[in-house]
Amino acid sequence: MSTLPARKSRTLPRTLLGALLYSLLCWGSQLAAAETTPPTPAEILGFESGQWHVRHDQIDTYFRVLAENAPTTTRLEIIGRTHEQRPLLQLVIASEKNLAKLEQIRQQHLAVARGEAAFDPNLPLVIWLGYGVHGNESSGPNAALEVAYQLVAAQSDEAKQTLENAIILLQPSLNPDGMDRFALWANMHQGTSPVADPQHREHVEPWPNGRPNHYWFDLNRDWLPLQHPESRARIAQFQRWLPHVLADFHEMGTDGTYFFQPGIPSRNNPQTPAKTFELTAKIANFHAAAMDKQQTLYFTEEAFDDFYVGKGSTYPDVQGSVGILFEQASSRGHLQDSINGPLSFKTTIDQQVLMSHSTMRGAVALKTELQQSQAEFYRDAQAAAKVDPVQGFMVGDDGDSTRLNAFLALLAQHEIKAYALKDDMQLQGQQFHQGRSYYIPLKQRQYRLIKAAFSAETNFRDNTFYDVSAWTLPYGFNLNFAQSRTTPNGIADQAWQPKVAKVPAANAGAFAYALRWTDQQAPVMLAELLKKGLIVRSSLQAFSAATNNGLEQFAAGTMLIPAGLQSEGWFETLLAVQQQFALPLSEITTGLTPVGSDLGSRLMVPVTLPKVLLVAGPGINSAEAGELWFSLERLAGISPSLVEPQRFSKIDLQRYSHILLPDGNYSSWQEKEQQLLKSWVAAGGILWGQKGGAQWLAEKSILQAKVLQAAELAKLISSSAANYSDKEQQAGKKRIAGAIFAATLDLSHPLAFGLPRAILPVFKNDPMLLLPASDAYVTVGRYTDKPQLAGFTSPEYVAQIRQAASLLAHNLGRGRVIAMTDNPVFRGYFVGSGRILVNSLFLAKAFDSQETGDDGEEE
Ligand SMILES: [Zn+2]
């Protein structure tokens, strides 16, 4: 985080021309003047609120000017950068007195909030106003300009009173990359007068729309997994400040009115204390009063559950803050017809401004109660931890320190402490080895967040979920994971902290160098070696070999870099790449192995750099395409070519070794596309299909598998005797909103190489199933007899899932077809099952599903 240097302020011109001159002058000159009233957004931007959709660079410009002109009451901070390098802004607004001792106040406030100091009513509140985590919900960011101006410049009694009582943390745009995508779209279609017709191009966003971030991730699902820089920056500020109230401004469909929490009482996270809802409801009275005054319709306690802790309005609730969701009907453009009449962008902005003020008004009125509630939150959590039969959680991983450290780093960002085990121990049938296992005690400040993040609940009082019903973090990371009812004897005194990994550099002169395949970074390092021209082979079987460290065992999948096959300068390259990734290399001294294949065996198969086409465009599930794109880069070091399905039949497929079909609707693909794909696979291509992609491949007999479609499964749950009022509940039962299942993998199959154990947690949010193949060696993964690990699934479905396949892979001509009905890289943090995707890139040609194979001589 950096604080922008305050510039000297100056008297300001008040005309548009003046504003233009001003903004030109602003950066260059150093005229000194006294603090003045800052300019309005319109004076700087040249247009009135709602006339155009503001771009992020314009927000940036305005906030800089605002902060420069009010150096004693504002502090503008760049708290991070987006993928596209836009600055993430936070404007701290406080009274002159409070801003002068901001850091001292923050420390005192944290001490109280963490239960380390006594409640102090003289401390100010901390109120967080966050806008536009969904980029195409732009009334929020546009409102943020007005709210900031009104707080900083307007000398109203209420603004003064707010700043006397509260520190305001205002984040004007939580998803600038997405917001700009939408702002450009809305602006480029505006003519001299706005067109309200919903069919006008302005109101029909192209693919991908502005909601997600650069990699098409929904940032309002990433508050817990923290896969993106926007989320990491935000959570660092959240933990740095622990606000009393966090307001999260969104938009919903055009025909809506206005929603503010409280939401549906039965769909709250069980870790949120009742007091938090009570306070949410009390603050809601202030929203209602403001809306009533201007006779605007609104609703509460309906829709939008508050269950998944990775959302902006729920994450704060399990940490002593009051998170509040706001949903404004969207004009999605400048003016759009709705059932409530034409809805203008200006109206939507004004209502977000109104709710920003009612939030501050309500919070200030309830100041003491909010402060007491936060102080009590952690005390109550400690009391709950004391009587909890579970003492803590154990996690560990034996072969993959990258994956384990990434998990621990995630916990650390949420201020959850984990302690290294000093002795090996066994728990619930799992081995936890010292040095590679950590204990997360529940008796720590983040008791409720840990309970929420590690929950593996399968029974719920309400079975309808707006979002996922499970997100158990250790399953996503595929770690050994167990509850502990006792505190282990030997644990480290200090909690885990990140440290720079170091490995000894490989020595020259070995016969071959071996890279173990278990580490999450190994495939990325392999890709780098291949890009730099090194020759690499993969072992299809386990083997042992003589090394400079004596006899070492190597699992199947181990990558070998034989010295005799390389070209000039290769060893310097190897050392440089090893230094970059900090993974150990074993120095094998002879090609003759005591156990398993010798290094020159045909079972040491060549590995080549994949050239990947990822189908991404209209009809395709953009979130899943984005997750694949993001994960291919991060887990495999491969940047795919993104190709729209509509262009597929017109391109040269010979450029690619792999084609990936994410979930989506492929009905636009006709005979031509099918034939192209079939002949490309027959000639040696590797085809990956997941969910809807897999279903389409099966329908076209490219994937040889029987699909149990969602509609067929839904017939298992009869609604014929249900009342009309049960409709929503019935629909909830027919969905798999998002649950975690246990699959068992054939570890001897190349697609499973590097996995630490046969049981693999997979994420399912689509009821469609694949049946196991009748042919041998095709069903690589199937669900276990007790497949439910976490989340809600109807018992009728579980019975079917128990008999279904999770991963199928077979030959087709000289190529391969691989299919999954789960999402292997769900929300980026399912890196455990992500290994299957990675293996399909590097090892698909290493398997042969035909019983009478061609002896490995292929290609
Ligand atoms: Zn939203």
Image (spheres, rainbow, N blue to C red):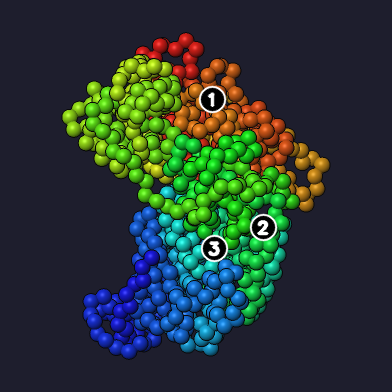
Amino acid on which disc 1 is placed: Asp
Q: Position of residue 135 (x, y in %)?
A: 46, 59
The nearer-to-camera label among 2 and 3 is 2
Q: Marks 2 and 1: which is nearer the front?
A: 2
- Indicate the amino acid at tag 3: His
Q: Is residue 259 above or below residue 360?
A: above
Q: CA distance from mark 2 to mark 3?
A: 35 Å
Whether pointer 1 and pointer 3 mark residues with C-beta atoms closer than 8 Å, the reply is no
Q: Which mark is residue 746?
A: 1
> 581 or 177: nearer the eye?
581
Front residue of 783 and 356: 783
Say which element carries label 2.
Answer: helix
Q: Residues within 10 Å of mark 3 (few under 14, many from 20)?
A: many
Kind of residue at badge 2: Ala
Tag 1 secondary structure = loop
Q: Which residue is mark 3?
A: 250
| Residue at figure coordinates x 64%, y 46% from the top left | 484
In percent of the image, x 23 and y 31: which residue is there?
A: 508
Q: Nearer the viewer, residue 574 or 735?
A: 574
- Residue placed under numbered mark 2 in the picture: 385
